[in-house]
Image (spheres, coloured by chain):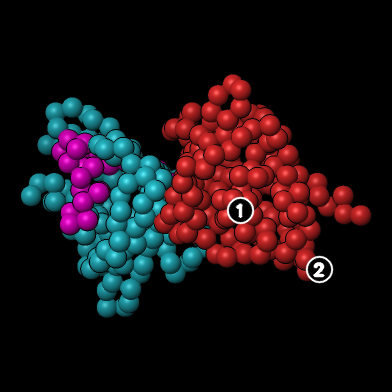
Chain colours: A red, B cyan
Amino acid sequence: MTTSTRETQIVADPDVPLVRITREFDAPPSRVFRAHTDPELLVRWLGPRGLEMRIDSFDCRPGGSYRYVHSDANGEYAFRGCFHDVRPDELIVQTFTFEGAPDGVALEKLVLEDLGNGRTRLTATSLVDSFEGRDAFLASGMETGVVEGYERLDEVLAG
Amino acid sequence: MTTSTRETQIVADPDVPLVRITREFDAPPSRVFRAHTDPELLVRWLGPRGLEMRIDSFDCRPGGSYRYVHSDANGEYAFRGCFHDVRPDELIVQTFTFEGAPDGVALEKLVLEDLGNGRTRLTATSLVDSFEGRDAFLASGMETGVVEGYERLDEVLAG
């Protein structure tokens, strides 16, 4: 089976303050792209299990912007940014800020590659302006959210 | 006189793929900010002398976007991006792409500091995801555009 290729790789780049996430999905790029750009699908998988997600705005086009809120019993966590580039089934470039640390901003790039046979490789990079900021992001518990989020995305794509 | 403090410093960061530009102006932050956010002022100074500038769109607010075109006898050079954050008189965070190299994107941060006595220190950083890309940007002749642009901005602020 394909279990081995469903592993989420999270790599800290050795040269620049960037995190690179790689994951494969059993669905073609068009469906993986739609799951990132259709708010009704996005709320079903983005982030770890056990959090509720509410989208305040989501205008996924070059020059659009977004804001969403994750919440649990402890409170709310809001995120926002703007979309720099959106190419259907291929690429999304956006900014990203956790409103709890409003001076921090990441430049995020999502690339989808068609592996054939209805499969897709997703590469998501997140660039910040210091290694301290990058390493704090890695130490923040983001791995759980990423791994569980992509498991939930598998479920959305299988549904 | 203040000639010495009008020097434009352009520094390649040793640790991360970032360019840091520092410049002081004989005007308070509110006027320097307005010269960056009012399209009628911006076209009078952004870029080197000898180029015409046309603004196609310029929605300078968090979640807005922009596109402008420089032109000379050799042709047109278009640039575009989105505004991630805009704090009056203090901060602008935006993305930036030269459309001639549409896969390249920079995360730009403009910070204005009040030096008192009607003076401002501007710090503009530009972050990309590789040292090769950063060094190509530095080697592109950008220095002329930056230095001449800020001399033209002096003239706008004096006007």
- Looking at the image, residue B52 lies above or below residue A122: below
Residue B29 % position (x, y): 21, 36
Q: Relative to B53, does residue B137 appear above or below in the rendering? A: above
Q: Which residues are magenta?
A: B14-41
Q: Amino acid at mark 2?
A: Asn
- The 10 Å Cα crowd at callout 1, few under 14, some 14 to 19, many 20 or more, is some
Per the image, the residue denoted by label 1 is A36
Please provide percent x and percent y for residue A129: 51, 39
The circle on residue A53 is: none
Residue at the location (58% across, 60% down)? A91
Across and down, in percent, residue A104 comes to: 48, 35
| Residue B20 among magenta residues | yes
Instruction: Name above or below for residue B115 compared with residue B151.
Output: above
Within 10 Å of the Cα at label 2, are there few (<14), some (14-19), or many (20+) other Cα atoms? Answer: few
Q: Residue at x 68, y 31 (%)?
A: A50
Regarding mark 2 in the picture, which secondary structure is present there? loop
**Which picture quadrant has residue A45?**
top right
Q: In percent of the image, x 73 and y 44: which residue is there?
A: A152
Residue A117, numbered label: 2
When the figure is inspected, residue B94 is found, relative to residue B141, above or below; the finding is above
Taking the image as drawn, is residue B108 in sight?
Answer: no
Task: Give the mark nearest the N terminus, 2 or 1.
Answer: 1
The x, y position of residue B39, in whole percent, is: 22, 56
